Amino acid sequence: MLVLGIESSCDETAAAVVHNGASLLSNVIASQIDVHSKYGGIVPEIASRKHIEAIVPVIIQALNDAGVSLGDIEGIAVTRGPGLVGSLLVGLSVAKSIAFAQGIPFVGVNHLEGHIAAIFLSEEKPDFPFIALVVSGGHTIVCLVQNFGDFSIIGQTRDDAAGEAFDKAAKMLDLGYPGGVVIDKLAKSGDTAYVQFPRSMKDSMDFSFSGLKTSLLNYIKKREDPITENEIPDIVASYQEAIVDVLIEKTLRAAENLSIKKVVVSGGVAANSRLRDGFYEKAKNKGIEVFIPPIIMCTDNAAMIAVVGDNLLRKGEKDHFDLNAISRWPLESWSVMKQV
Ligand code: KG4
Ligand code: ZN
């Protein structure tokens, strides 16, 4: 089955063509980073307008790159949530229009399930069940994945998401946006033990990153002499280490507690080099196999949405034209929310 995926939940307008939920024929991503970076974060109203401008050219490009025409597409998968409603509605409206005009089915997909499913486009694919860590700009979740659409949350953040912790730190230190990418690069030459940042909620499977953010703010404020440029790599390396440490430790703990030998790491923060290396290294000692998609499949893309869509369409699922976008859509209530 040839599925067209459409993603517009945040600041990336994306379209992809995927064959049988496993082989990627095209993957087009139009990023709005340049537009939002001068504001130090995403401006929702601007994001929606940029999606409107980009969505049709991005879809045409995805079809061209795949060497197929709209008539070859058998179903459409579109991100329904969670995300910015104005942004989601752009993708959803276009998906409905194409489905209506072509007389083909469309399905709304959970963006977080998409992040997890990105691993099925890799050469090395895990079997179910596995533990998944979803770490993005808006979410930090560890869950047990028994099948498509079958998730049990083991732990999640009580406040900021890990990606948010990166982005806010970069803003505080005036390093640019998106913070995760900048910090990842700068931290490579830094000393991870330069500042002792806290690792919170050690005894819980949940996460909290707002205390870490505050401790960076306090560190900056309490300094008698201003922070020098030379110190920045050391400070961000220490900060990054505090995030990476807890993400790896709790995810592997979840796997050990449930005797699950496979772990999938996904979402924008899974692009982080320290997190990737740390997972492979620490899991090896525990006999746990780690699966992380290539960087381009970790950050937002439409191919991951098409993979989930393929599975739903195969089961005969089909959404109606009155389907609405939803800004908050927890993974666990997937089956309930499908009725909304
Ligand atoms: O999954 P994603 O592209 O969008 C959301 O669904 O949120 O994730 C974006 C987040 C941002 O917070 C960004 O700073 C973070 O992923 N990110 C990274 C890296 N690349 C992107 N964080 C750490 N290291 C990176 N290399
Ligand atoms: Zn995402």
Image (spheres, rainbow, N blue to C red):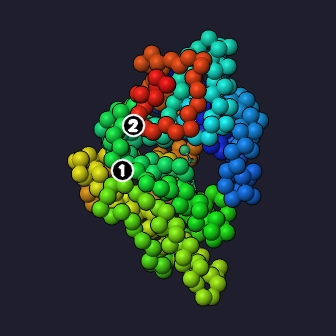
Is there any visible trace of residue 284 in the rendered image? no
x and y percent of residue 216 in the render? 53, 72
**Label 2 vs label 1: CA separation?**
12 Å
In the rendered structure, the answer to whether residue 263 lies left or right of residue 167 reads left
Q: Which is more toward the observer, 126 or 50?
A: 50
Residue in the picture at 77% in, 35% down: 53
x and y percent of residue 168 in the render? 59, 62
Residue in the picture at 58% in, 40% down: 83
Outermost residue toward the top? 103
Contact, mark 2 vs mark 1 (Cβ under 8 Å): no
Residue 204, image quadrant: bottom left
Query: Residue under circle 1?
Result: 155
x and y percent of residue 210 in the render? 49, 63
Above or below residue 175? Residue 316 is above
Query: Residue under circle 2?
Result: 332
Disc on the earlier residue, 2 or 1:
1
